[in-house]
Image (cartoon, helix red, strand yellow):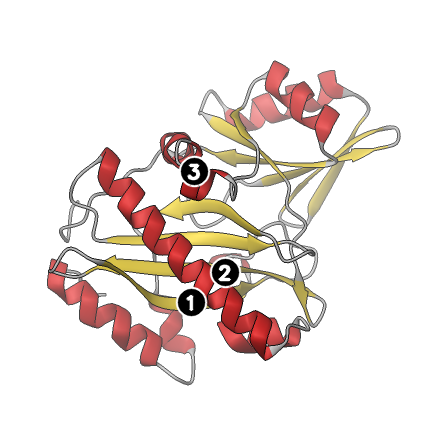
Amino acid sequence: MKTYDSTSVKSKWTKTNWLLGSAATREHMPSTMPFNRRNLIHLLDKYTTVFFKPTNGSGGFRIIRITKLDNGYRTQHNTSKITHAGIKELYRHLNAKAKRRDYLLQKGIKLDKANGRPYDIRVMVQKANDGRWKTTALFTKIGQPGKVATNYNQGGKIGYFRQTLADAGCSEQVITHKKEQLERLGEATGKLFDQHASGFRELGLDVALDERGRIWILEVNTKPQFYPLKQLKHKSMYHTIMSYAKQYGRKK
């Protein structure tokens, strides 16, 4: 049921193709392909870690991490791990999990860590009534050690952008530079999506910093959730987002 006026695109594959088609975003995209046996073999030949994720999923559910071992492969869903002797067994296992639904395979990014915990970054961009995209929030999702996804409903916690990056060992200068890069990337993504469909008013980019500080777009949410921001002591980000959201009828 549509409750407010902003375009939504569920398919991660559609959005991935948009991002790969633009010079502004292409360099930030990890290698991503539709799930099939050939693509599974191809990506595992190139990378030691690959993620298996539903094309239409959200909230970090049903994501499986595949790790290449010396003598086979290991899959992990939440905290449960299974070892597979070879590619045939691995493919059979993933195919059974897919249950004929569309899945994607994505190169695994080794997330940077803050105080020993992996984190990624949510870049929230919204379009005001004047038609301009604006970054309205930057916050972090800090994962549980040993979990596959950092999402709030997967046991992760919400953090402040500057504090998390400081905990990861970044200097104030580096943090300010990353903030500017992420804001530009978010606003460029909004403009790019406008080229493919009309009616977008909000986007939530899930962005990773790898251990070298390189920025990677993991996915773009067209119906981003921000209710966990209400759990933070300082609620200015939540109030800023809501001040924009009310312009297109979003109430929570």
Q: Are marks 2 and 1 in contact (CB under 8 Å)?
A: yes
**Circle number at residue 23:** 3
Which residue is painted at 42% across and 34% down in the image?
Answer: 16
Lower position in the chain sequence, tag 2 or tag 1: 2
Q: Quadrant of residue 39?
A: top right
* Marks 3, 1: nearer the viewer: 3
- At horizontal 50% and vertical 48% (from top left) the residue drawn is 60
Q: Residues within 10 Å of mark 3 (few under 14, many from 20)?
A: few
**Which percent across, then down, holds residue 240?**
27, 74
Q: Residues within 10 Å of mark 2 (few under 14, many from 20)?
A: many
Q: Secondary structure at mark 3?
A: helix
- How far across and down, in percent of the image, does residue 75 sit? 70, 36
Badge 2 is on which residue?
121
Q: Is residue 82 left or right of residue 161?
A: right
User: Position of 101 compared to 106: left or right?
Assistant: left
Q: Would you say 239 lies left or right of 147 here?
A: left
> Which quarter shows the N terminus?
top left
Q: Are marks 3 and 1 in contact (CB under 8 Å)?
A: no
* Residue 140 in sight from this viewpoint: no
Residue sitting at 11 percent across and 60 percent down? 129
Amino acid carrying mark 3 in the image: Ala
Q: Residue 78: in sight, yes or no?
A: yes
| Residue 106 image offset from top left, x and y in percent | 57, 34
What residue did someone put label 1 on? 138
Secondary structure under tag 2 reads strand
**Mark pair 2, 1: CA separation:** 7 Å
Describe residue 76's horizontal placement relative to residue 31 as left or right. right
State the mark number for residue 55.
none
